[in-house]
Amino acid sequence: MAYKIFSRLTLLNLQIKGPQTAFRALNSGCSLSVEHDRQNRRFTVTQGSGAGGHAECAVLHYKFTGEKEVDLVSTYVPETLRGQGVAALLSQAAMDFLVEEHLKAHISCWYIKKYIEDHPMKTYKELVIP
């Protein structure tokens, strides 16, 4: 089952679920959701069960470097989820988290740097610590 999620055509709904936040992306009847695991300081996207009965998981890791500062450390998208806009979805969720929590960020991950450059209309650049 192949499908693509385009960030411009993606509908995002914010749902609060206790300590975790879920961002849902819907496109052509397929659904991916970004879960924010605050305790483990990461955003994840999981898609069904992969080979062997385990779910494939994409992840964006961050760490706090100060009271109102984080470092967006890395993103990883497994091969089965690549080319579907999953890294962009993770990046958008992380950047929206910064906006909502009034945080500033160091960006260690090359992909998130690219995502911010590719989305100049958003106020994301103002959140980056050089």
Image (cartoon, rainbow, N blue to C red):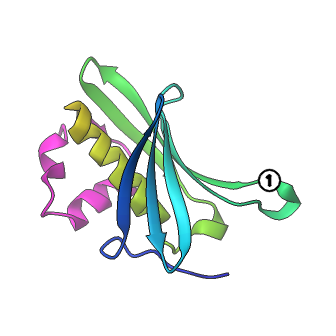
Dot 1 falls on a residue whose secondary structure is: loop
Examine the image and state in which quarter residue 120 appears: bottom left
Residue visible at 50% across and 80% down? 28
State whether residue 120 is above or below residue 104: below
Examine the image and state in which quarter residue 12 appears: bottom left
Q: Residues within 10 Å of mark 1 (few under 14, many from 20)?
A: few
Q: Residue 45 location in percent, x, y?
A: 55, 53
In the rendered picture of this protein, how many numbered marks are placed on residues?
1
Query: Camera-side residue: 69 or 130?
Result: 69
What's drawn in magenta, residue-wise? 105-130
State whether residue 111 is above or below residue 16: below
- Furthest residue in direction right, as rendered: 52
Left-right relation of 97 to 127: right
Left-right relation of 117 to 31: left
Residue visible at 54% across and 28% down? 40
Left-right relation of 36 to 103: right
What residue is pinned by disc 1?
54
Q: Residue 27 location in percent, x, y?
A: 46, 75
Left-right relation of 80 to 114: right
- Residue 128 in the magenta stretch? The answer is yes
Q: Residue 26 location in percent, x, y?
A: 46, 69
Query: Camera-side residue: 111 or 13?
Result: 13
Residue visible at 32% across and 30% down? 70
- Split into 4 quadrants, where in the image is the N terminus? bottom right
Residue visible at 47% across and 28% down? 19
Residue type for callout 1: His
- Split into 4 quadrants, where in the image is the C terminus? top left
